Image (cartoon, helix red, strand yellow):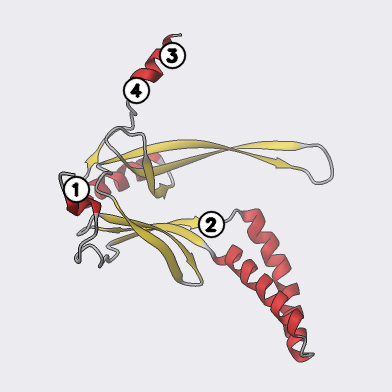
Amino acid sequence: MDNLEDLIDNSHLENHTADLTFSQGPAFGSTGRIISGIVLPFFLFIFISSIVNLAIAGTLVSFIFIFILMYILTAHTGIELCHSTQYFKEYTSFLGLKFGKWKSGRSLTDVAILTIRKKKQVRSSFGSNSISLDMVETGVYFLIPSHRKRLLVKVCKNKSDAEKSAQELADICHKKFTIFSPKVSESTKARMRR
């Protein structure tokens, strides 16, 4: 316990203000949002007709479904950064309100670019056909020194945009811009030799 200030919050760490905000897009996939958009008018109709007919149970049930469907339609995720306290908040926004918890980012010393390939399988509803889609996501990440833990900060369109964003972010946040290369532990090296 060398530095207690790193372990507990003091008065100046409780007042975090977002200096940078990065939106990472919708919290739910396009299929869920499309289905929610189709089903929502049905529950709005039930809600209005339940109010007109003074049906309390129908009003309550339809309100709950409307709330859930609106959350699926409008929820977005992102990250906010505070320079002065070196804290970050991964948030989910819903109807303009942001929900999340501030966490210490002092152990995240590096900034790197990662390209992650994601496979998505789309199945036909009328047959056994399926299509496999390969999606590539290039993002700017904060990393701990061993590069074992990472935090997605920004999703970029291409690698050159990611390099520019990563360099700017490293300069603003006083972090080291580096190439992603996680350190391999001794136990992993021994397992690889077998």
The residue to which callout 1 is attached is 174
The residue to which callout 4 is attached is 185
Q: Give percent across and percent down for residue 158.
A: 42, 42
The residue to which callout 2 is attached is 27
* Nearest to viewer (mark 4 / mark 1): 4
The crowd level at tag 3 (other Cα within 10 Å; few <14, some 14-19, many 20+) is few
Q: Give percent across and percent down for residue 17.
A: 27, 66
Dividing the picture into quadrants, the one containing residue 181 is top left
Ranked by sequence position, the earlier of labels 3 and 1 is 1
Ranked by sequence position, the earlier of labels 3 and 2 is 2
The crowd level at tag 4 (other Cα within 10 Å; few <14, some 14-19, many 20+) is few
193 above or below 174? above
CA separation in Å, label 1 and label 2: 29 Å
Q: Give percent across and percent down for residue 83.
A: 22, 57
* Near-viewer residue (145 or 10): 10
Residue at left offset 43%, top offset 67%: 98
Ranked by sequence position, the earlier of labels 2 and 4 is 2
- Type of amino acid under label 3: Met
- Type of amino acid under label 4: Ser
* Nearest to viewer (mark 2 / mark 4): 4
The residue to which callout 3 is attached is 192
CA separation in Å, label 3 and label 1: 36 Å
- Type of amino acid under label 2: Ala
Q: Decide if residue 42 is on the left or right side of residue 144.
A: right
